[in-house]
Image (cartoon, grey):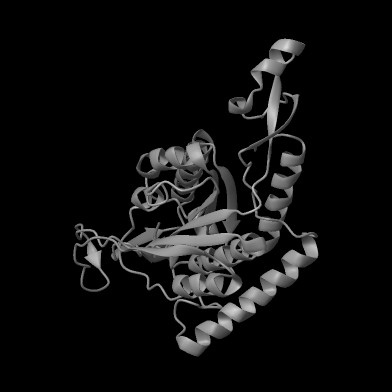
């Protein structure tokens, strides 16, 4: 999507250096800790605790239960479908796949999309790092594609591979803070990272069952990342956090609007006074978001959408509370 205008924000981890970055992360951590501890009472092993491998008691099947946990001997004896409960693992390993393509350096609400990505990672870190749990990350930046035809704001970016960075999974808050510093200090490169390759890094090498979280705007074609996400879901609980800006859903009526594609640098002028153009844009955006949601459903991933013009932390709290409520009722989604 194209970026309409530069937006200022009180928190800019990507632009800050040294002491400024530390101050921003400390303030963000304080905000997350205060709000999550106040709204989510209790100490949990993780955001979506792993189901574990140690067998527990059986209970009757409920719609939404994983059919792979069917207890066939009990089902045969009682003639009623039963599933086998498992004892939850007490140590959860969480991996974040964080997409920092150039399209994330955009925002027309209260935040840039990149800021919401970093803030969501901070909240997840706070939720999952307790109790000796380990958290790691893979971070992807721009792929710098070959320049297409068009008008440019400056020199077109050269072709080149994207950059994928791995931060090993380690326990402890100090290590978690180091992960967040690495994330906040990652520069945005022109182009789009290969989201499919980024997700696939979580499949190699195979890891113990845990939680995998993919944070992106998911603007890459679904066929690029859908298959790696389905493969990831076979072994792990998967949560997809989609970051959206309101201007990606609809255009304002502001006359001729010059827009720049942050991934390629291509410049266009759009006549937003045309109601038919605004309607076509809204319809195309809605279809795009529905395709993303359908692909995430097909992969069996949890789906959380955060917007730059909303209270992202409150949306995250509501999602976590709904997930835990669903699990206490015996459902998986």
Question: Quick check: can you spot residue 250?
Answer: yes
Residue 88 screen position, x and y as percent: 67, 44
Residue 317: image location, x then y, percent = 71, 57
The answer to which of 119 and 172 lies nearer the viewer is 172
The percent coordinates of residue 139 (x first, y second) are: 41, 62
Q: Is residue 116 left or right of residue 14?
A: right
Q: Is 78 on the left-hand or right-hand side of 229?
A: right
Is 237 on the left or on the right of 77, as rendered? Answer: left
Q: Is 147 drawn above or below residue 229 in the view shown?
A: below
Instruction: Check the image and report above or below for 92 versus 227.
Output: below
Quadrant in the picture for residue 65 = top right
The quadrant of the rendering that contains the C terminus is: top right
Q: Please count the marks in the image.
A: 0
* Residue sitting nearer the eye, 172 or 126: 172
Q: Is residue 270 left or right of residue 64?
A: left
Percent across and percent down for residue 129 are 62, 63
Q: 33 or 311, which lies in front?
A: 33
Above or below — where is 70 with respect to 115? above
Q: Residue at x 59, y 69 (%)?
A: 172
For the point 65% across and 48% down, the residue is: 49
Pick out the residue farthest to the front.
Answer: 54
Work out whether 65 lies above or below 141: above
Residue 311 visible here: no
Q: Residue at x 42, y 46 (%)?
A: 206
The N terminus: image quadrant: bottom left
Question: Viewer-proximal residue, 294 or 168?
Answer: 168
């Amino acid at each position: 999507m194209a970026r309409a205008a530069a937006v200022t924000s009180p928190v800019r981890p990507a632009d800050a250096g040294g002491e400024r970055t530390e101050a921003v992360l400390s303030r963000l951590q304080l905000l997350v800790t205060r709000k999550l501890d106040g709204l989510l009472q209790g100490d949990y092993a993780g955001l979506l605790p792993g189901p574990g491998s140690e067998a527990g008691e059986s209970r009757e099947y409920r719609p939404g239960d994983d059919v792979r946990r069917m207890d066939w001997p009990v089902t045969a004896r009682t003639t009623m479908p039963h599933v086998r409960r498992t004892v939850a693992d007490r140590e959860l390993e969480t991996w974040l796949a964080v997409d920092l393509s150039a399209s994330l350096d955009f925002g027309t609400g209260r935040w840039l999309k990149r800021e919401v990505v970093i803030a969501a990672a901070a909240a997840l870190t706070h939720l999952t790092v307790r109790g000796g749990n380990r958290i790691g990350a893979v971070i992807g930046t721009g792929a710098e594609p070959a320049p297409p035809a068009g008008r440019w704001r400056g020199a077109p970016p050269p072709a080149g591979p994207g950059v994928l960075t791995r931060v090993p999974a380690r326990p402890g808050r100090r290590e978690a803070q180091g992960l967040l510093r690495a994330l906040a200090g990652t520069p945005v490169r022109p182009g789009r990272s290969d989201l499919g390759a980024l997700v696939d890094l979580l499949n190699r090498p195979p890891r113990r069952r845990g939680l995998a979280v993919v944070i992106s705007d998911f603007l890459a074609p679904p066929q690029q990342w859908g298959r790696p996400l389905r493969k990831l879901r076979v072994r792990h609980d998967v949560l997809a956090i989609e970051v959206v800006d309101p201007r990606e859903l609809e255009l304002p009526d502001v006359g001729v609007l010059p827009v720049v594609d942050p991934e390629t640098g291509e410049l266009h002028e759009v006549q937003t006074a045309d109601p038919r153009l605004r309607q076509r844009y809204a319809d195309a955006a809605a279809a795009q978001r529905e395709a993303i949601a359908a692909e995430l459903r097909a992969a069996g991933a949890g789906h959380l959408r955060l917007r730059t013009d909303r209270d992202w932390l409150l949306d995250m709290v509501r999602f976590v509370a709904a997930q835990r409520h669903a699990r206490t009722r015996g459902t998986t989604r």
